């Protein structure tokens, strides 16, 4: 069963602490230039925005992978990624930092520094004890992300989505997203499929326990289900807010009415009713068929002394056949 970590637990005390009372144990002379743009809290920490995270607070969740492995990697007591400088090394694996010491803790990003070997580090202050430590990362990888969750990002997602109603539109890559909306029952972690147009209410934002990502807890009459919070923005075409959905449906309804009225004027009410449903019938003209089915993929033409015939190809098993401009046969 998936363990859900709620980040707000104890957070007000940690985040509101006076960070300037914590002492920096080591000064690094060479620092990395900090981005002048401000972090808008709309993205998790990754390659494209890590420089904006200076002065942000990060949360290190209890992740399944590091727990099974015995600890977290890439944390050092100085800006040097030599294993002799591992911060709080694990007893079983000295190249990892102790899992229990690191997990479920908050870290303040004090700066970005460059070590003697040219490696870049996040200079962190561990907020429960005030230690200064250095997280080494590879900034030349486009798929770079860390085990951290930015507290500001979590709070932003919470404020944007909790209490809002959403309508599931369906998966697919129309919006250019690689994120599919995979639903998991929060009780037993079983996967669930939903039809498009299913309504939900977002009741919480939580941390996933096997990846450093956030999940939305969506509720409907069938129960509570988690889905990646990355799926919720409308631009990815997985969900719409209820307001967006109603507006889109109203526009579609208006467009349908206008189209049906136009077709009725051109072809009569009975034919218009078929066309708006995507149906055709023997006797339709070519234009009427285009109005209903759209343009064919291919047209095969045959002409003889008796007239002309055409085969309109729509797919491997969908064809329309015309004689002298009128539909005579339908294969679908």
Image (tube, rainbow, N blue to C red):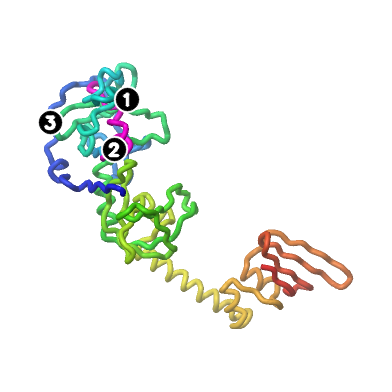
Position of residue 295 in the picture relative to residue 202 (left or right): right
Marker disc for residue 120: 1
x and y percentages locating residue 290 in the rendered image? 65, 68
Q: Rate crowding at label 1 as few (under 14), some (14 to 19) or many (20 or more) other CA atoms within 10 Å.
A: many
Position of residue 79 in the picture relative to residue 145 (left or right): left
Residue 122 placement: quadrant: top left
Magenta part of the chain: 62-78
x and y percentages locating residue 21 in the rendered image? 10, 32
What residue is at 39 percent from the left and 54 percent from the top?
191
- Circle nearer the N terminus (1, 3): 3
Q: How many marks?
A: 3
Report the quarter where the C terminus lies.
Answer: bottom right
Marker disc for residue 22: 3
| Disc 2 secondary structure class | loop
* Residues marked 2 and 3 touching at CB (< 8 Å): no
x and y percentages locating residue 26 in the rendered image? 18, 21
Position of residue 234 in the picture relative to residue 91 (left or right): right
């Amino acid at each position: 069963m998936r363990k859900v970590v709620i980040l707000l637990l104890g957070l007000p005390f940690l985040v509101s602490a006076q960070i300037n009372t914590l002492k920096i144990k080591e000064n690094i002379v060479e620092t990395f230039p900090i981005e002048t743009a401000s972090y808008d809290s709309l993205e998790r920490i990754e390659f494209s925005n890590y420089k904006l995270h200076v002065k942000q607070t990060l949360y290190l969740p209890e992740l399944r992978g590091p727990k099974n492995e015995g600890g977290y990697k890439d944390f050092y007591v100085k800006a040097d990624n030599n294993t002799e400088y591992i911060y709080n090394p694990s007893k079983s694996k000295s190249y990892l930092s102790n899992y229990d010491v690191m997990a479920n803790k908050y870290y303040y990003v004090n700066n970005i520094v460059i070590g003697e070997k040219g490696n870049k580090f996040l200079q962190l202050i561990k907020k429960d004890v005030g230690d200064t430590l250095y997280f080494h990362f590879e900034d030349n990888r486009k798929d770079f992300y860390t085990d951290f969750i930015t507290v500001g990002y979590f709070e932003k997602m919470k404020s944007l989505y909790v209490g809002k109603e959403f309508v599931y539109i369906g998966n697919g890559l129309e919006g250019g997203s690689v994120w599919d909306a995979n639903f998991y029952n929060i009780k037993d972690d079983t996967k669930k499929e939903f039809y498009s147009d299913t309504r939900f209410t977002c009741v919480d934002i939580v941390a996933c326990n096997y990846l450093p990502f956030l999940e939305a807890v969506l509720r409907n009459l069938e129960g509570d289900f988690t889905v990646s919070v990355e799926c919720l923005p409308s631009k990815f075409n997985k969900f719409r807010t209820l307001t967006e959905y109603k507006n889109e449906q109203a526009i579609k309804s208006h467009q349908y009415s206008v189209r049906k009225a136009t077709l009725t004027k051109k072809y009569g009410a009975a034919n218009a009713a078929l066309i708006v449903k995507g149906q055709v019938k023997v006797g339709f003209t070519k234009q009427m068929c285009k109005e209903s089915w759209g343009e064919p993929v291919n047209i095969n033409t045959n002409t003889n002394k008796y007239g002309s015939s055409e085969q309109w190809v729509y797919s491997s098993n969908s064809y329309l056949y015309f004689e002298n401009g009128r539909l005579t046969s339908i294969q679908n």
